[in-house]
Amino acid sequence: MDAQARWSGRTVCLLAAGLLIALTGWRQALAATEYSFAVVPQFEQRKLFAVWRPIVDELSRRSGFPLKLVAPLSVAEFETQLSGGSYDIVYANPYHILRESSRQGYIPLIRDATPLRGIIVVARDSPFRTPADLAGQRLGIPSPNALGASLLVRADLERLFKVKVEPVNVKTHSSVYLHVANGLLPAGGGVEKTLAEQTPAVQALLRVFYTTREMPSHPIAAHPRLPPEVRTALRKALLEMAATPEGLALLEKVPMSKPVAASIKDYAPMLAWDLEKYWTP
């Protein structure tokens, strides 16, 4: 082998070694970056941390990326920070993700395969029998922009039945059900999944008065600034969690009992529902 060939071979080896070092450093830098994981305030703070901290900790362990759970005190705060792109990873309602698709462009990673349906509940002995009976009545809601529990039920009442109600924000789904069960409000908006989480005693006092059309469930989504490798690793780790009894037990508390890979295309049909009219800035 002549000197030029030896030099060329040595150069290739040096370049390959340099590339390997650079890639290793890049991976280490990604693994050292802490990503925020924000959850829409679906529960009161203590319960939210009890449900989500074990999930976030396990996801961090499985994916290899440090994650920090962020729990805004209000839905309004969550929406402001979401619109500003403050969060790296979010658990949000589908309409949050759709509204931000042309701005922040959050990318859905997984969702529950079980569809979401909004409901209106009344007291079990309520005299209300048809949606027309709700005209002018107060309707408890967990937040003005809750998808199934507020936007969709209000849209259905107005468009399908020509009925307008007075929304009353009582902050959480559980609070909606308690207000109605205790006679403090004549009706309330919720979703089937959260009603099923209430105690048997509370459920026994309520009657599902109306059920909306189906929609895909809330996704866990990532901001597009996260490298594709990170998003792929997070999705893989979440699905691997769901494939174990221990991991699935954690996700079922969300509730997310049948996690599947998600895409923004899953939610696109909802754009035709014209829910923007009912959105509260």
Image (cartoon, rainbow, N blue to C red):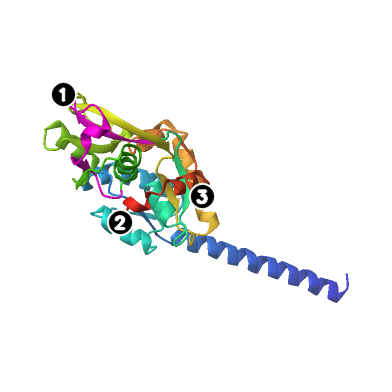
Residue at 31%, 42% in the rendered image: 158
What is the distance, in whole Å, between disc 1 and disc 3 at their CAs?
Answer: 50 Å
Q: Which of the two residues, 149 or 226, is positioned nearer the viewer here?
A: 149
Between label 1 and label 3, give the one nearer the viewer.
1
Element class at badge 2: helix
Q: Name which residue type carries label 1.
A: Asp
Q: Which mark is residue 125?
A: 1
Closer to the chain start, of discs 3 and 2, is: 2
Q: Name which residue type carries label 2.
A: Phe
What is the distance, in whole Å, between disc 3 and disc 2 at their CAs?
Answer: 25 Å
Q: Is residue 16 visible?
A: yes
- In the shown orientation, is residue 249 left or right of residue 22? left
The residue carrying mark 3 is 233
Closer to the chain start, of discs 2 and 1, is: 2
Between label 3 and label 2, give the one nearer the viewer.
2
Q: Which residues are magenta?
A: 116-145
